[in-house]
Image (cartoon, helix red, strand yellow):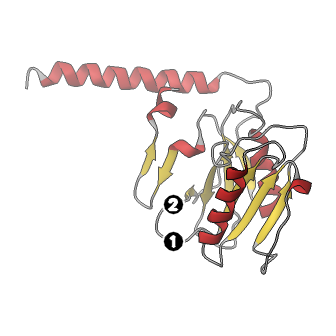
Amino acid sequence: MRILRPALCVLAAVLVLAGVYSLVASRIADSDSPAPSRVPPGYAVLPDAGGRPALVACTVNSARRAALRNVAAINHIVTALHRESRVFILTNDRDAFSVLSNPSPERVRFLGLPSGLAFTIWPQDPFVVLESGDPARPPVYLVPRQFTRADDRRLADLLAAETGAACIPSEFVFEGGNIVADRDFVFIGVNTILH
């Protein structure tokens, strides 16, 4: 017990300092960041397990400039999803793609991104989806205080405009892809915690 007690004190001190550092670092004002708002009560992180996805968003760079395997990957994803799952394919070069067959145009839709901006293939990173469990209440996209990778921060606003979701800025810096949840637990990647 004597050995554990100092070790636990050191661990607790490290966690407290890490928490204080994260809180202070996340509150440093960024000139491009809007002031944080409050998430309405009753919202929680959308679970990654326990049901089929209702909406999937994939980003694809220009087929004229990107590797064709990216296009093939999107085709496999769309084909593997349940027929009731809606898919948004976000691209900054819509004219580079041709659709050979789309029997459900309301299911698979292309959304144009500004052509002068750069986007990565990770559309889940610049926000976290929150839901209330009430179909009458729209989802909330919680965006980090700062997100500087390419122009991906714009994806939350573009998707919110299409889905009717609200974008609410957070006080913290995070990557949505480093946050995985089910109904009972939320797992956060160590890189996000260290940042």
Near-viewer residue (29 or 120): 120
Locate residue 128, reporting x and y percent: 62, 49
**In the current view of this chain or complex, which residue is farthest to the left?**
1
Residue 47 shows which numbered tag? 2
- Where in the figure is residue 121, as x and y percent of width and height? 68, 45
> Dot 1, how many residues are within 10 Å of its Cα: few (below 14), some (14-19), or many (20+)?
few
Residue 151, quarter of the rendered image:
top right
Q: Amino acid at mark 2?
A: Pro
Q: In the rendered image, is residue 139 in sight?
A: no
| 10 Å crowding of disc 2: few (<14), some (14-19), many (20+) | some
The residue to which callout 1 is attached is 51
Image quarter of residue 78? bottom right
Residue 56 image position (x, y, % from top left) = 66, 62
Where disc 1 sits, the SS reads loop
Q: In terms of depth relative to the viewer, which is nearer, 137 or 41?
A: 137
The relative height of residue 176 versus residue 50 in the rendered view (above or below) is above
Secondary structure type for disc 2? loop
What kind of residue is marked 1?
Gly
Q: Which residue is outermost to the bottom?
A: 103
Q: Quadrant of the N terminus?
A: top left
CA separation, marks 1 and 2?
9 Å
Name the residue: 59% across, 68% down: 53
Q: Are dots 1 and 2 in contact, CB under 8 Å? A: yes
> What residue do we see at 76% from left, 70% from top?
108
37 relative position to 80: left or right: right
Observer-nearest residue: 21 or 125? 125
Which quarter of the picture shows residue 95? bottom right
Numbered badge on residue 144: none
Foreground of the two, 193 or 6:
193
